Image: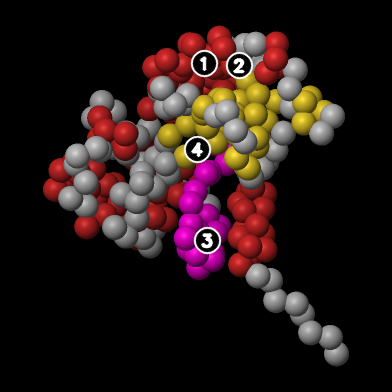
């Protein structure tokens, strides 16, 4: 009788990422880092908006150039995408018909992108890759350990957890399932340190979308104009 070969950690992680992608059929694929501020995700190049409001320059110099439009990977033409921080930059990128995916920040406390970007991306059949689902660890078991200067984030998150009640087991589950409750979201970009963390994420994702009536309440919980929802503004606070 043969023995089943045990998967190593890398194989388990890859298997887990595949399962996450299978949950969302609109856009799938893991990413590998390339040089020049561009990632490739399932043959989709993502131009990074690292300077936030300077995206029009990025659009002109990178996304709208014939050179990027004609980039080929292994002999096949690839799709283009953009990694953005702000709503205006994301909408500017979607004006380009070549842009087939956006990577944007979105979470329980930062719903800015759901107002206009999600619907516009859907109309243009562009995938949405959500990052910052856990808001740099705020929306995890670390919630009670936040420094006092981030108290507005902690307090609003606890209000959301009160609304959720027994519908979720943990803070991180609420964060993950909130993002997965939006049909426009194609994939979540999350980071894990261990196989156990990944397996926990997968188990939480398997619980599915949040109830619609609760989701409507949570949509109003975001700190729309508070600069704290952007971790780039945390310098000197933590």
Chain-order first, disc 1 or disc 3: 1
- Measure the C-alpha gap from mark 1 to mark 2: 7 Å
Nearer the observer: mark 1 or 4; the answer is: 1
Q: Identify the element where label 4 is drawn.
A: strand
Question: What residue is rendered at 69% in x and 71% in y?
Answer: 7
The percent position of residue 70, horizontal first and vertical second, equals 75, 17
Residue beneath disc 4: 130
Q: For mark 3, does the 10 Å Cα neighbourhood hold few (<14), some (14 to 19), or many (20 or more) residues?
A: some
Residue beneath disc 1: 58
Residues under numbered marks 4 and 2 in contact, where contact means CB atoms less than 8 Å apart: no
- Measure the C-alpha gap from mark 2 to mark 3: 33 Å
Residue beneath disc 3: 198
Residues under numbered marks 1 and 2 in contact, where contact means CB atoms less than 8 Å apart: yes
Q: Is residue 130 visible?
A: yes
Q: Identify the element where label 2 is drawn.
A: helix
Foreground residue, 38 or 95?
Answer: 38
Q: Is residue 165 above or below residue 126?
A: below
Q: Specify the quadrant of the image occupied by residue 72.
A: top right
Q: For mark 4, does the 10 Å Cα neighbourhood hold few (<14), some (14 to 19), or many (20 or more) residues?
A: many
Q: Looking at this view, name the residue that lies furthest to the front.
A: 35
Foreground residue, 74 or 229?
Answer: 74
Q: Identify the element where label 3 is drawn.
A: helix
Residues under numbered marks 2 and 3 in contact, where contact means CB atoms less than 8 Å apart: no
Question: What residue is rendered at 52% in x and 44% in y?
Answer: 189
Nearer the observer: mark 4 or 2; the answer is: 2
The percent position of residue 54, horizontal first and vertical second, equals 42, 15
Residue beneath disc 2: 63
Asked if residue 21 lies left or right of residue 180, the reply is right
Q: Specify the quadrant of the image occupied by residue 149.
A: top left
Chain-order first, disc 1 or disc 2: 1
- Measure the C-alpha gap from mark 1 to mark 4: 20 Å
């Amino acid at each position: 009788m043969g023995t089943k070969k045990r998967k190593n950690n890398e194989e388990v992680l890859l298997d887990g990422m595949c399962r996450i992608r299978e949950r969302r059929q609109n856009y799938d694929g893991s990413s590998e880092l390339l040089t020049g501020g561009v990632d490739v995700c399932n043959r989709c190049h993502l131009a990074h908006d690292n300077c936030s409001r300077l995206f029009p320059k990025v659009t002109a110099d990178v996304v709208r150039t014939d050179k990027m439009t004609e980039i080929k990977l292994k002999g096949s033409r690839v799709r283009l995408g953009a990694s953005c921080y702000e709503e205006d930059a994301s909408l500017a990128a979607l004006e380009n018909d070549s842009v087939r995916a956006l990577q944007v920040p979105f979470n329980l406390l930062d719903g800015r992108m759901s107002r206009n970007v999600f619907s516009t991306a859907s109309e243009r059949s562009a995938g949405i890759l959500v990052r910052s689902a856990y808001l740099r660890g705020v929306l995890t078991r670390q919630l009670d350990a936040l420094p006092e200067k981030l108290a507005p984030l902690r307090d609003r998150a606890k209000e959301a957890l009160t609304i959720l009640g027994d519908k979720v087991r943990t803070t991180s589950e609420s964060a993950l399932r909130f993002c997965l409750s939006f049909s426009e979201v194609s994939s979540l970009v999350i980071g894990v340190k261990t196989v156990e963390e990944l397996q926990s994420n997968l188990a939480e994702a398997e619980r599915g979308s949040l109830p619609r009536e609760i989701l409507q309440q949570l949509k109003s919980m975001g700190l729309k104009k508070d600069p704290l929802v952007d971790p780039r503004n945390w310098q000197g606070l933590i």
